[in-house]
Each structure stands twice: as structure tokens, then as C-alpha cells.
Amino acid sequence: MARTQKNKATSAHLGMLKAKLAKFKRELITPKSGGGGAGEGFDVAKTGDARIGFVGFPSVGKSTLLSNLAGVYSEVAAYEFTTLTTVPGVIRYKGAKIQLLDLPGIIEGAKDGKGRGRQVIAVARTCKLIFIVLDVLKPLGDKAIIENELEGFGIRLNKRPPNITFRKKEKGGINLTCVVPQSELDLNSVKQILSEYRISNADIILKEDSSCDDLIDVIEGNRVYIPCIYVLNKIDQISIEELDIIYKIPHCVPLSAHHKWNFDDLLEKMWDYLSLTRIYTKPKGQLPDFNAPVVLKEDNRTLEAFCNNLHKGILKDLKYALVWGSSVKYQPQRVGKEHVLADEDIVQIIKKH
């Protein structure tokens, strides 16, 4: 495939080969029925408002980073494969409780099951943010290998889902609608890809310039899109000039886990990538409680979600709410359950009498 010249004549055939490859990869990933469990030490219960996984090769400083960030003892040594199970830790940052997972080091071929790699990457799929911890002396080679392992397991880093509508139907053949001009996909290549999945009736709407890989991701439907920060550790071993160059790499934070250098930058970037919303409660006639905010996810910031987060029974007694903050025009303002809240809003619930 890499040696095949890319043009209109070969694009359909390449698309079909990519679809075949995606199917084989899915069969590798999906465990056979009757197999063993997830493996001891990998079934860590979710706690807190968000979960962050530390992914990287053995001995790049993941355990030292967790120990210094969360104060959790994760066995640290100078030899490789010190961490053999998932070690959880919790930090509180800007009022939110964030779970950190120190995952065992992965090796090349992890997505195919080498070195318990499948269990490690399966835990990484459940995280809201991934820290890829790299040794600053050999960052780019390691970065490419780890990205390839995660991509092979259906994790898409720092990407958003393709803007493609795909709907199967009973009859009527394949209908392709292109909202914008396409550079790679046409009706012939789409039919070739769908024939590999034995789909002969479907409606497909391409709302952006999409590739064969984008369409395959949508058809497979098991991809997860996770933001990622590249943590370049051991900056105490390089010069200032090298550090200036490293800072230009996107989604990257250079630091020293051992000396605790640049942790503030990492935590600030972590907060930006998590996109959490803090809402403060205000009991009637009292000052707002700024110590324990209710933390909402970016995709569900309505007053209804806020009430359900406090208690499931609040919503049926809700008359309206008073809101102070950037999401309203007046301070305070009456709002209903559909109102979308903003970060650091203050909410007072008014119940029906």
C-alpha cells in the first residue's frame, strides 16, 4: 500500500484495502469469547470528575511524575518494567477531583498483545485525557511508535470525529451526498469500502473533505477521540537552546519529574484540555460555597445536568434557578432547566412550594 501511487484510478482499490485492514485489526482487538479477564491490577474503579492515563515506554519517568503530582507511592527504579499494574492517584485542582493512572510501560507491538499491551491500551481508552510521557533525549521516534500503537487500538489523539453522516437502510442502493468538494472519496471508492463490510444500501453525507480512513472510522463506530498532551520528561539533561526548540512542538509540555520543574505549566494545560465547568452552589440567604464546586463535563452543562449531579430528586421540585455569572445577561437572572451554564457560575435553586 505504501508503494502504490495515489491517483483517481487507485484510490478506490486503496480504500478497499484499508477497509480490509481495519476489519482484521478489529478482529485482533476484540477478545474471543471465553477468554480470560482483564488481568489483575487493570480494573481500577473510576473516581473523581475526570480520568487521566499516563502512557509511555518503560523507564521514562511516569511513576516519578505520579508520585510528585499526587503524592502516591508508585515503585520507582532505574531498571525497566518497574510498574507492572495500574497505579491510581488523585489530585485536586481548581476544585475538581482528577484521577491519575500510572499505566505499565508499553512496548512496540502492544496493540497486538505484546507485554500486556492490550490491557494497558484498553484502560487508556476509558480516560478523558492521555499524557504520553516521553524521554526528551529521544522524543520523536518514541512518539511515532506510541501513536501508532494507540491508533491501531482505535484511539484517535487530538482529533475530532469526522463530520460524516452514515445511515444503513433496507433498500435503495448507496446514496452519496457531498456538501463540500472531495479530494479523495467518490462514489466508486465509497462503494468499494462498503462492499468490504457487505453493505449495499446506505445513505452517506460528507460534510467536510474526508479521507478513506475517516469513512472507515465512522463505519466501524468503535473509535474514541481523546485529547492528548506530550510530556517531555528529563529536561535537566538538555540545554536551553534545545528546550526552546522543544517548546514549539504542538500539544507538548517539557518538564522534569524528578526536580518538579514546570509542573504549573502541565497542570494549566491539563485543565484547558479537560474542558471542565465548575458551578458553585448558593443556599438561600447565605454566601456561595466556593470550596466544593459541582463539576460538569463540556458536552452537558445545562441546569438539568447540574441538578442531577446534586441529587436526582431536585429536578421534579425545581421551580426555577437564580444564576450569577457569565452565562446570563442580568445578575442574578431567572433560568429554566435548559439554560447552559458557564465556568464559575453561581446557582441558587428555587423549589416549588
Image (cartoon, rainbow, N blue to C red):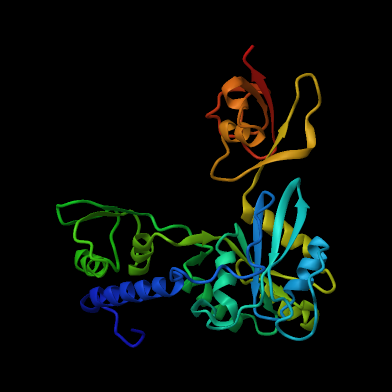
**The C terminus - image quarter:** top right
In the rendered image of this protein, does residue 216 appear above or below residue 274? below
Residue drawn at (59%, 65%), measured in percent from left and top? 123
Q: Position of residue 214 (x, y in %)?
A: 37, 64
Farthest residue to the top: give it. Answer: 353
Q: Position of residue 204 (x, y in %)?
A: 26, 55
Q: Is residue 20 rendered to the left or right of residue 85?
A: left
Is residue 197 shown to the viewer in this render? Answer: yes
Residue 313 sits in which quadrant?
top right
Residue drawn at (69%, 72%), measured in percent from left and top? 85
Q: Is residue 69 rendered to the left or right of residue 297?
A: right
Q: Position of residue 320 (x, y in %)?
A: 60, 20
Residue drawn at (83%, 63%), measured in percent from left and top? 71
Farthest residue to the left: give it. Answer: 172
**The N terminus - image quarter:** bottom left
Q: Viewer-proximal residue, 133 or 74?
A: 74
Q: Position of residue 104 (x, y in %)?
A: 67, 74
In the rendered image of this protein, does residue 227 appear above or below residue 257? above
Is residue 209 shown to the viewer in this render? Answer: no
Residue 289 sits in which quadrant?
top right
Residue 183 sits in which quadrant?
bottom left
Residue drawn at (66%, 40%), measured in percent from left and top? 343
Please count the marks in the image: 0
